Amino acid sequence: MNVKGKYLNPKADLTFKLIFGEHKDLVMSLLNALLPLPADGKIESVEYISNELVPDNPGKKNSIVDVQCVDSQGRHFIVEMQNVWNGSFVKRVMLNTAKAIVRQVGVSEDFNRLQSVYSLNLINGEGFDTESDQFYHDYVLTDVNHHEKTLDSIRMIFLELKKFKPKSIPERKMAVLWLRFLTEISEATEEVPAELLENADTCKAIQILEKSAYDESQLHHYQNFWYTIHSERVLEESGHAKGLAEGLEIGRAEGRAEGRAEGRAEGRAEGRAEGRAEVARNLMQLGLSVADIAQATGLTIAEIEAL
């Protein structure tokens, strides 16, 4: 299998799950770096749980890569890599976050057992927030009248990787290193930045990406993943283009119809105006005063004097 470069891309399903789904220290490092956890609430240990929350979706199953775990405090964490953006992704995140809450209760309905659920969503695509350069989006339940009052049992974080710039969060070194790892390391990487190699966590993750560590079957799976992602992106883009074209055509048709209607209305209005002007000219020839003609036709004195 001809996979170029010394390193593989960490955003593929194979590599992402090897790094964050099989190495607890690395997923803890990622979560502690990127989540808005309280200073005294850092993750100290985790256990992986199955990804049964994710429903089968044949059309999109390859574009979403996820890892789920629970820490020693009982808090649940869902980490997802979204490689092809589509409008239903946010709703899917909301559904899976809600399911993670429900799953904690089970059959006992002991609501005191409920712990927070954090959903960390890494977006390797376009379209989440086209109106802003902001790359980090933090959602909680908020009182509409008092924004300082929040219910943070459910917290959904969306990170747009393509908007990330290291200077965005200079005070959070580990967050910057992980985001640089996710955005700068790929098959095109020839020399790994020294900062990533000097940190124990990112260095370990980079070692996992070395192509020489993968067998032919794994590399075949890896390359098929990117073929599928490319196909999904083409379908999304062609679907968007088709929708735009259809919308434009509908708009043009409506515009033509509206134009015809407006034309008829304008024609009728112009006809009525011309008719009043003709009546006014006839009355002027009969010697009526301007005031009488204005009263008879509805034209203004200025309009009559301009005839």
Image: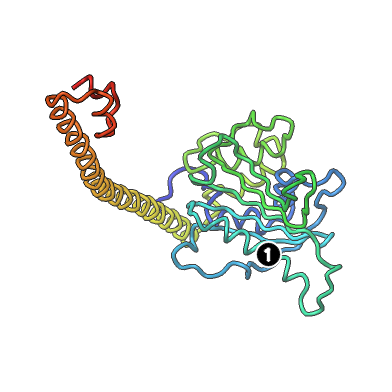
92 left or right of 30?
left
Residue 102 picture location, percent across and down:
72, 70
**Which one is nearer the viewer's eye here, 265 or 304?**
304
Q: Name the residue rendered at 29%, 32% in the picture.
A: 295
Tell me how many marks there are.
Answer: 1
**Which one is nearer the viewer's eye here, 269 or 81?**
269
**By what rule are the colours in the image chosen?**
rainbow
The amino acid at mark 1 is Ala
Q: Name the residue rendered at 75%, 44% in the picture.
A: 147
In which image quadrant can residue 263 be found? top left
Q: Is mark 1 on a helix, strand or loop?
A: helix
Most extreme residue toward the bottom is 107
Residue to which mark 1 is pinned = 98
Q: In which quarter of the image is the C terminus?
A: top left
Above or below for 107 versus 181: below
Q: Name the residue rendered at 56%, 41% in the picture.
A: 161
In which image quadrant can residue 173 be found? top right
Estimate how packed mark 1 is, as few (under 14), some (14 to 19) or many (20 or more) residues with alpha carbons within 10 Å: some
**Which one is nearer the viewer's eye here, 296 or 276?**
296
Residue 292 picture location, percent across and down:
26, 28
Q: In which quarter of the image is the N terminus?
A: bottom left
Residue 169 picture location, percent across and down:
68, 32
Above or below for 96 versus 174: below
159 left or right of 43?
left
Residue 135 picture location, percent across and down:
60, 39
